Amino acid sequence: NYAKNLNGRLGAHTGWVYISYAILYGGAYVVGTAFVVGYALGLSPVMVSLIITASAISLVLLGVKPSSRYAIATGALEIGIILYFVVGSFLHAHLTVYNPFSNIRLTRGIPLAILLGASIPTGYGVLAQVSGEVVEAERTVGRAMLTVIVISGLLASIFVLALTNLAYTMSLKAHTLGAESMLSLVSNVNEAARPIIIFSVLSDGVLGAMAYLMAATRTIWRMSQDGYMPKWFGVLRKGEPTNTLAILSPAYIFITTVSMLFLPAFDDFVALGVVAALCSLYIHFVANTSLYSHVRKPNSRGNAWRIIALLAMCYTGFNFGFSLYEGKTVYAVVFLGLTLTGLVYTLLRPSKHHRVDLDYSS
């Protein structure tokens, strides 16, 4: 629940920022996929993005069960491809392992690099929003989120290390790799893997767009139930918030296609990703602040949660502040515009939620 442990207006505002995050992050998924697939196959990125978005919307309309089956099948395929590439890259490099800590230089761009690195999709950001449709959600969702963070983070780290290792073995500078050299790098491991990689990228774009579109619809539906969105958004048809989807679908199409008419696909991908990441940091900071302030019993377990929350607040706040400073001004302006619009909107809505104290003593 977007506002379970927050006061009414702050919870509603956080829900608003999450909706912005889900739309922008899902849009970045689509645009990034359209850029890579369009380049690899010589197709228009706009056409590819329309295909991906239409496929994602269709899956959301089918409901949770068909969407989850697609997610499981696609996720298993992608894990297999990642592991295949990792093994192949190290074999191609004759088991030479590049030390990622051998050439670290502190520069002004480090916070922004951390922002983009931390935004590698792991999937935990959409689990809470669909918890209402999960059996034994209180026990299952938390464990699933922790598992996803650990396994996805580990896979992403190993994949980036393997990619960098292969690049240095081939005397390429990893930070200068573009779409062409990235695809060539993959082909050097195994040319036959190239179409499989492209298919995986395409299916992942559909999966990412579907997941965040579903998360956004559930958040809006929940907010409508609490009175922070019009009741029209709370109408369900066959268990699905189709009214919400009817509004969000054009927004997704606009974000993922019309924006590419004004920006090159890669620049559009970066812009959507950075603003979405800023929204994500804001949400995490609010959640950490809420956790710190709502632990009520001063025992050892409660103090441990307070320390964890405080450390997370410091890390998120540092990265958030420096990312705003290091990034382009337009990214900060768009982010602040979204948050201020949400603030004005939520201030005009009545508050229905009250403060809830959390007990972590048991």
Image (spheres, rainbow, N blue to C red):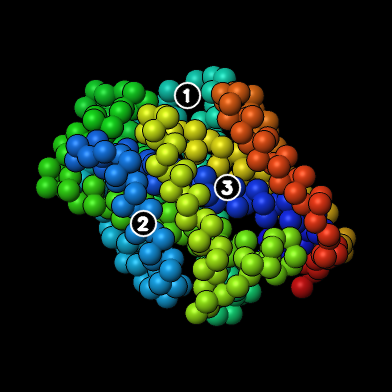
Amino acid type, callout 3: Tyr
- Residue 85: x and y, percent? 25, 47
The earlier-in-sequence mark between 3 and 2 is 3
Q: Which one is in front in this view, the residue at disc 1 or the one at disc 3?
A: 3
| Residue at numbered disc 2 | 54
> How many labels, in total?
3
> Front-most of 207 and 247?
247
Which mark is on residue 21? 3
Quadrant assignment for the N terminus: bottom right
Instruction: State how far apart marks 1 and 3 are (Cα).
Output: 31 Å
Instruction: State how far apart marks 2 and 1 are (Cα).
Output: 43 Å
Q: Is residue 232 left or right of residue 258?
A: right
The earlier-in-sequence mark between 1 and 3 is 3
Which mark is on residue 12? none
Instruction: Kindly tell me whether residue 50 is visible in this rendering.
Output: yes
| Residue at numbered disc 1 | 104
- Residue plotted at (24% across, 23% down): 171
Instruction: State how far apart marks 3 and 2 are (Cα).
Output: 20 Å
Residue count near mark 2 (Cα–Cα under 10 Å), binned few <14, some 14–19, many ≥20: some
Query: Disc 3 on helix, strand or loop?
Result: helix
The correct choice, above or below, for 328 with respect to 128 in the image is above
The earlier-in-sequence mark between 2 and 1 is 2
Amino acid type, callout 1: Ile
> Front-most of 338 and 322?
338
Amino acid type, callout 2: Ala
- Residue plotted at (55% across, 42% down): 276
Query: Disc 1 on helix, strand or loop?
Result: loop
- Residue 96: x and y, percent? 26, 35
Dividing the picture into quadrants, the one containing residue 101 is top left
Quadrant assignment for the C terminus: bottom right
